[in-house]
Amino acid sequence: MRFSIPAGVLLPVLAPLAHLASRSSNALPALLGVLVEAKPDKLRLTANNAMTGLSVTLDRPPEVAPYTEGKALIPYTWHDLLRNVDGPVEVSGEDDVIVVTYPGGHARLGGIPADSFVMPPVAKTSFELGTADLKAGLARVGFATAKKLEDQNPLDHVELVIQGGAVRWAATNRYQGAVFTTSASGTTNAQLCVPVDALSLVARLCNAEKVRMGVTSQGFGAVWGTTRLYSRVNTTPFPPFVEYLPTDLPTKAKVEVARLRDALARVSTTAEDRLRVRVEDGCVVLAAAYASGESEERLPATVEGDEVEMLFNPPLLADALAHAPAPEVTLEIAQHDRPLLLRADTQGFQFVMPMMDDAVQAGPADDEEAA
């Protein structure tokens, strides 16, 4: 195998592939490299870390001589070697030794047997999603996925339900969540649970207007241009929380997002681990009590329904507000022990689970017994 390619063409493609290979949780050497397959007019580069696979095909630049066919599995460290290189890069060799030549230097890398590389599966694509919709969906629900969970926990995934030309995005980490709807083209109705990291990788790398997607019983695939991604999906059922969220909540308060966010930031400095939110006639009240005092701010709001009061973890509420897409948000509340819905448009909403108010839970009988 031998080929020459401008570093400016190779490096943007090699960077995510090398990063993917370097994150392999499996000690198999075959998963710690980037497979390079050369044909006279094309290069295909593939990485696979057993969870996610990524494959990119590059056409030979017209000013470059035809490539010598062959394949090699090159350790992911060759990206670090070429990180600051400018000019043509020539790669030659097979399994045992790979020679990388660049302006002003060269390196000999120990190759990995190419036949040991496991090609990622291919998921047949069945629907198409606009890249702008993909990025919007991630921005609206991605924050609510869980972080650093054990294997086979679906809460670090995003649920996609495709039906009738629409895609419903949903994510939750038990304490907060989000739901969003975008459009899709294609005739497939499907329900899949996709790792948020895989969707983020597609959103970051996709340079086309649309991306084709598909799913098998255990995998998710995305294709755009000459790039193909595959990710294993979690087969553990995603919690059907959307069906259990309350609808048509009796108390609603519309308030300016910027004012609510700023007030929340100020009151939270004294809130310790809990913040009291109260909806009254014409206003939303944020209050916190702490060891040496208390703080309170009142914000004008358009209110419908009865007065209600809830307790929240301040960072969770701030996180949901940070992803409100409009200048105003409507707080929808049922009662103190039900989720608070934050709705800024008709495409979706965020929700935050309240903290339990010990005084409310105790009730009059318990208060008398305590006395």
Image (cartoon, helix red, strand yellow):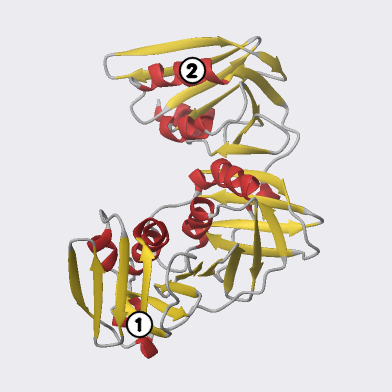
Instruction: Compare residues 328 and 283 and report the one nearer the observer.
Output: 328
Instruction: Compare residues 5 and 22 and report the one nearer the observer.
Output: 5
Q: How many marks?
A: 2
Compute the Cα span from label 2 to label 1: 62 Å
Residue 321 placement (x, y as % from top left): 52, 29
| Rendered image quadrant of residue 116 | bottom left
| Rendered image quadrant of residue 314 | top left
**Quadrant position of the N terminus in the picture:** bottom left
Label of residue 125 in the image: none
Upstream in sequence: badge 2 or badge 1: 1
Residue 194 placement (x, y as % from top left): 56, 62
- Amino acid type, label 1: Ala
Residue 56 placement (x, y as % from top left): 49, 68
Residue 248 placement (x, y as % from top left): 76, 34
Q: Residues within 10 Å of mark 1 (few under 14, many from 20)?
A: many
Image side of residue 286 versus residue 136, left or right: left
- Amino acid type, label 2: Leu
Residue underneath mark 1: 72
Q: Secondary structure at mark 2?
A: strand
Residue underneath mark 2: 286
Q: At 40% across and 77% down in the image, what residue appears?
A: 36
Say which of marks 2 and 1 sits in front: 1
**Quadrant position of the C terminus in the picture:** top left
Q: At 39% across and 77% down in the image, what residue appears?
A: 35
Image side of residue 204 versus residue 18, left or right: right
Q: At 33% across and 20% down in the image, what residue appears?
A: 270
